[in-house]
Amino acid sequence: MEMNKEFVTLALPGEKTYEIPVITDSMGDKFIDIRALRKDTGLITYDPGFVNTGSCTSSICYINGEEGVLRYRGYDIEDLVKYCDFVEVAYLLVKGELPNNIERKRYADLLNEESLLHYDMQSFFRRYPPEAHPMSVLAAMSVSLSAFYPEMDDIDPELQIDFAVTRLISKIRTITAFTYRHMKGEDFVNPSYKYSYCENFLNMMFNSPVREYKIDPLHVKALNQLLILHADHEQNCSTTAVRLIASSEANLYASVSAGICALWGPKHGGANQAVIEMLKHALETHQSAKEMVEMAKDKRNPYLLMGFGHRVYKTFDPRAKIAKQLCQEVLSHNGFVDPLLNLAMELEEVAKQDSYFQDRMLYPNIDFYTGLIFRAMGIPTNMFTCMFAIGRLPGWIAHWLEWKQDPYQKIGRPRQVYDGPQLRSVKPLSDRS
């Protein structure tokens, strides 16, 4: 990263001018370095939602929203989905390089070894009401890992990556499956050394002593791809939450639990659930795709078309292209028929042909398709965000580890623009009307 070879000039009315350095990143993009702005000028910037603010430097993920590019550690998302499984991509994000055969086998073995939950943790599940939202259970159980495995803060950093980090990637899958089983009132199915990461998850979710369950290879493929697509996405809400909590030097489990809570919201990880609910409501009330588009365009109508548009992408979400193809493949498998898919495909075509959506570059994003795939795999709607969390976990961990190596390492502490009352005098209670 190059610094201070270029400057921009800030001219304040009636005051002197200031030269502010420009940073050039490894892709040639330029950023105004305002770290000394308040010290030099007495001013701060106002940027709601941080849409123009770079909060850190990072080598984990690159996005070009104008061209629809997404890369993890320099690898295009399309290539990673085509040539790798989720275990390899998790290794890439956490360790910085794709594993070779020996490294991959060792990592997969370690994931299996760390997949069991502490016996006392299993009793926690039985204390939650079966109707509790799975994300509340996932967040609580994730942070509880620090109580059962406190040694992670005291071990060698390299071992921390290989054990504490791997433990979390493995156990979050078990926690999610156990949450589902508890929600259904069924006994837990422990992980097995016989299965891969994704096979183990599906088996823990759906195996039954009263009916035969065979792990569908297409569902294993779909789960691998969906987890890869969700594995990282630069400084989104939940990743920023993880790094913010990490900046207080909180442990990994606490930081990840904060990310899970941030992901829970319908504007972030809950968006795929919102898409399914929107499509179901449209079918139940006999709304056509055209009517849905027209309602979304009406400024007087609070109706929102879920699954369209993205804060970063100003063209088609590259993940959505892959998810759309996968969606059609999974939903045509074994004669599966979902009326929601037909409505979704019709809705996409109507929106793509509409000038309102074209002018605003509102294309289907990844959330438009993923819920349909999870639904076809038998995963209930209220579990969709948990699936997102399993995929995003390696990215969160990578950002937590990256922050630990950040030479700047300042605790996150944004400023604000105050718009409250000026100084007021306190009246005695007897004088207040």
Image (cartoon, grey):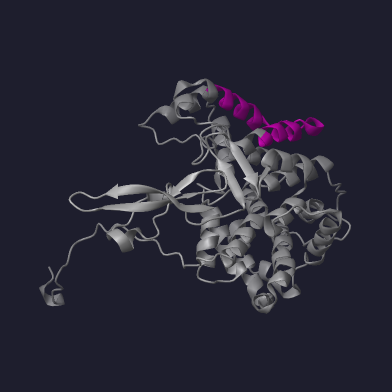
Task: Return the residue nearer the eye: 262 or 4.
Answer: 4
Q: Quadrant of the C terminus?
A: bottom left
List x then y, in percent, for residue 228: 70, 47
Relative height, residue 263 to residue 147 (above, below)? above
Name the residue at the front extreme.
5
Task: Return the residue nearer the eye: 339 or 102.
Answer: 102
Q: Is residue 98 left or right of residue 2?
A: right
Q: Is residue 358 magenta?
A: no
List x then y, in percent, for residue 104: 82, 56
Residue 377 visible to the viewer: no
Relative height, residue 308 to residue 173 (above, below)? above
Q: Is residue 345 magenta?
A: yes
Dominant SS of magenta comes to: helix
Per the rendered image, the range of residues in magenta is 322-350
Q: Is residue 379 left or right of residue 403?
A: right
Relative height, residue 347 to residue 252 (above, below)? above
Q: Is residue 20 left or right of residue 189?
A: left
List x then y, in percent, for residue 85: 77, 47
Residue 156 visible to the viewer: yes
Q: Quadrant of residue 254?
A: bottom right
Q: Quadrant of residue 93?
A: bottom right
Task: Please give the name of the residue rendered at 39% of the width and 33% of the height, measured from the top-left corner.
Answer: 301
Relative height, residue 358 to residue 220 (above, below)? above
